[in-house]
Amino acid sequence: MTVLEEPIKEVLTLKNYINGEWVEAKTDEIRDVVNPATMKIIARVPRSGAEDVDDAIQAAHEAFPKWRRTPPVTRARYLFRLKTALEECFEELSRIQTMEHGKTIDESRGETRRGIEMVEVACGIPSLMMGYNLEDIARGIDEYVLRQPLGVFGCIAPFNFPFMVPLWFLPFAIATGNTFVLKPSSEVPNSQTKLHEILDEIGLPPGVVNMVHGGREVVSTLISHPDIRGISFVGSTHIGKNIVYKTASAHGKRVQAQTGAKNYMIIMPDCDIDRTARAMMTSFFGNTGQRCLSGANLVIVGEDAVFYNRFMKSIVSYTKRINVGYGLDERVQMGPVRSPDKKQRIIEYIEGAIDDGCKFMIDGRKPKILGPYPDTCFLNPTILKDVTNDMKVAQEEIFGPVMNVIRTKNLDDAIALVHENPYGNASSIFTSNGAAARKFQYEVEVGNVGINIGIAAPMAFFPFSGMKDSFFGDRHGQGGGHGFEGAIGFYTESKVVISRWW
Ligand code: NAD
């Protein structure tokens, strides 16, 4: 049997990182963090309370005046050090993600790389944060715009990208001169604990970054605290919209809430069958379907039965070859879902679909697993056919390895299906026809569009978009973006100066 190198060797009760110190949470409520592949306990995480969050916000508030006066080039140098330190711990960081989340080691390495890329982009802050000016707006009068930091920002993260998602925000927030309080997902707190150990090592001034473990109480303090100027949230639509966006904006804070998804992959009959089928494997089953950019509904366009049969034969054949097991085993291509309740929820969606008249092309409920692991959190991929767009399974976010096959007549109808869905995170078209691709890109109402791309994930220097029920706010995460539409705009305020000297 393959020997798997697990970096977490001891079950520790995790601490909060406040004002440059590791401190115990002031609570007796501690929960186990379980590796979903082995079902072994790997850490204990505290449910911190309002007092812990308050300490962190106060530390960040006190650190702000000095940090904002630190020149951007000096702030950038901390990020250069962070980049080097992250590269040195690359493999350890990746293995921690697999242990706590379940994704394959290759997926974790991809996640680590994407996280580091955010730091690299934020290193360019002296250029990214520049304002603009115009001389002689009237005789002898000049006018210019400055971009300034605001104060303390909070971040509330989801379980599905334990390392990368907080890095969509943290490097940009501190590079622009703000200070930061992070609440990681309590399901996967180890990656951020390791990241904050590294942040501690690079010698950032105390209070610039802070981390508080916990759940609801931490969130409700962050979104209502008078010293928090803005919130970056990533998670489900229900929490993002009804709790975080509503409350934080009612308290006068900036909010960017990146939320749930139901992504349509539009397959045109002129696509490259083999390449498209392979792209569908990572789209639908990568990260075990627990990605906000995962394919969920596979829409086959046209009535060509020969194309349909050839395409689905290829999809089924690739799907059956996916090795499922513990992600630290390099042979494994799909890991478990994060927890037993998530598995149960996915099975309920599959069974509901069968009750609604769908049929199995592949039934993944009784998983075959590579290696001696309990099946508690494992599923194999499922493919359902005869799905129609009005069904619950096609409308709601399942967040698991389930492909719904929907058939439709033409591209207009396919785009209409996307628009009937409340979400607007991502959608892709697969075609060899440029006119069809352009029409799709032009008309489709989603934030991240793929053309022959299965996971339309924007790079760090572009904003991560999202529309409808997939995003609440007006400035997206990541990226410099033209006109400060992304992270730099979110984390800075513009000040206009009109100046005359006589
Ligand atoms: P979640 O909404 O359950 O949790 C997100 C965060 O909110 C966590 O930190 C959690 O502790 C906190 N939270 C949960 N319940 C709460 C409550 N009642 N009150 C206050 N805080 C609460 O989301 P999740 O399951 O961790 O993540 C999966 C979701 O995230 C999916 O919907 C996925 O589509 C979405 N997501 C979106 C993007 C994007 O960019 N749009 C990216 C990644 C994930």
Image (tube, rainbow, N blue to C red):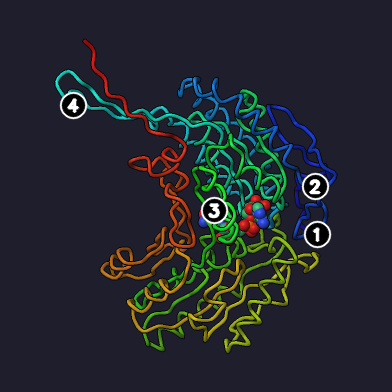
Q: Nearer the viewer, mark 2 or mark 1?
A: 2
On the image, the x and y values in percent for residue 380 come to 66, 72
* Crowd band around label 2 with a 10 angstrom C-alpha radius: few (<14), some (14–19), many (20+): many
Q: Secondary structure at mark 4?
A: strand
Q: What residue appears at the point 27 percent right and 24 percent down from the top-left corner?
A: 498
C-alpha distance separating marks 2 and 3:
33 Å
Residue 43: mark:
2
Which amino acid type corresponds to the residue marked 1 in the rendered image?
A: Met
Q: Which residue is mark 4?
A: 137
On the image, the x and y values in percent for residue 25 come to 78, 38
Which amino acid type corresponds to the residue marked 4 in the rendered image?
A: Ile
Q: What residue appears at the point 54 percent right and 53 percent down from the top-left corner?
A: 246
Can residue 105 be seen in the rendering of this structure?
Answer: no
Q: What residue appears at the point 70 percent right and 60 percent down from the top-left corner?
A: 338
Q: Which residue is mark 3?
A: 246
C-alpha distance separating marks 4 and 3:
40 Å
Of mark 1 and mark 3, the one earlier in the sequence is 1
From the viewer's perspective, is 13 left or right of 56? right
**Quadrant in the rendering for residue 340:** bottom right
Query: Cβ–Cβ below 8 Å for labels 2 and 3?
Result: no
* Crowd band around label 1 with a 10 angstrom C-alpha radius: few (<14), some (14–19), many (20+): some
Which amino acid type corresponds to the residue marked 3 in the rendered image?
A: Lys
Residue 39: mark:
1
Q: Is mark 3 within 8 Å of ligand 1?
A: no
